[in-house]
Image (cartoon, rainbow, N blue to C red):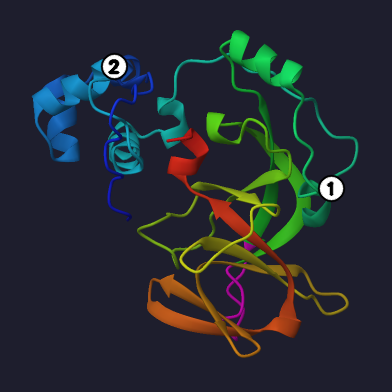
Amino acid sequence: MKNPLPEPQGSSPLPNRIRELRERQHMTQEELAAAIGTSKMQVSRLERGERRLTQSWMERIAQALQIHPAELLPAVQTFPMGTPRGAPSLREAAAPANEVTPAEDHALIAAGALARDIPVLGTSRGGRADGGADFELNGEVVDFARRPPGISQLRDVFALYVVGESMAPWRQPGDLVYCTRSRHPRPGDYVVVELQAEEGEAQAALLKRMVGLRGQRLVLEQYNPREELKIDQDRIKQLYRVIDWPELLGV
């Protein structure tokens, strides 16, 4: 897990729903503090917005409350985009970026809302005998996720549910990851690597941390078990950068 980001001078913390969701679980501040390994005073500061809600805090609190970290964002209305007529492919879901218009962005902000318009693409468990894939993409949109404020103007975004434990504890099975094609990955970024599929095979993909290029190979790191993977570039169909929580929240 990354270290918490330093507190920026003069910045205003984001509002949050910690108290609302804690009380919904009939949990006291003392109980939440014990569950996340901190003090009641720290929980109180987080709830009041006196302490910035970093990626690390979000993940710890969400685990204690048994929710997704995104639910800690301010309470919002949802605007379902409707069921798609046809299930797009991964490439179609991550089409070239189109920025939202200032009027659209202003409308969302004025409404105090986060649209639920990020397509979540379906996957099935991989685990091939050669250890090549974390999961297989089935080409269906299975849900729509909320659009966090940090990517309010980015259109080429899709999401995937994590399959398997190869990147634990960074991400656990069932966690949601947001991906983009327009923001190019750099060494140290988390990536989804879509592999070339043979005729008749399912579309295999990897979720890893990018180490960099060595000759004609892309070097990736996984956490569980700790291992480096080297993928020939001619095996790679597409490379997508995972947008992590600080960027999603715009902090």
Left or right: residue 61 versus residue 78 is left
Up the image or down, 115 lies above or below 140; here it is: above
Mark 1: which amino acid? Pro
Q: Quadrant of residue 215?
A: bottom right
Q: Quadrant of residue 91?
A: bottom right
Q: Residue at x 34, y 21 (%)?
A: 12
How far across and down, in percent of the image, does residue 147 sit? 61, 31
Which residues, given as a range, are shown in magenta? 125-134
Q: Residues within 10 Å of mark 1 (few under 14, many from 20)?
A: some
Q: Residue furthest front?
A: 10
Q: Residue at x 26, y 19 (%)?
A: 47
Q: Quadrant of residue 153?
A: top right
Considering the whole magenta stretch, tell me its main secondary structure: loop
Q: Residue furthest bottom?
A: 215
Q: Residue at x 60, y 15 (%)?
A: 109
Name the residue carrying label 2.
19
Mark 1 touches mark 2? (CB < 8 Å): no
Secondary structure under tag 2 reads helix
Pick the quarter of the image with the C terminus. top left
Q: Magenta span has 129?
A: yes
Left or right: residue 7 versus residue 234 is left
> Upstream in the sequence, badge 1 or badge 2?
2
Q: Is residue 68 visible?
A: no
Name the residue carrying label 1.
88
Q: Residues within 10 Å of mark 2 (few under 14, many from 20)?
A: some
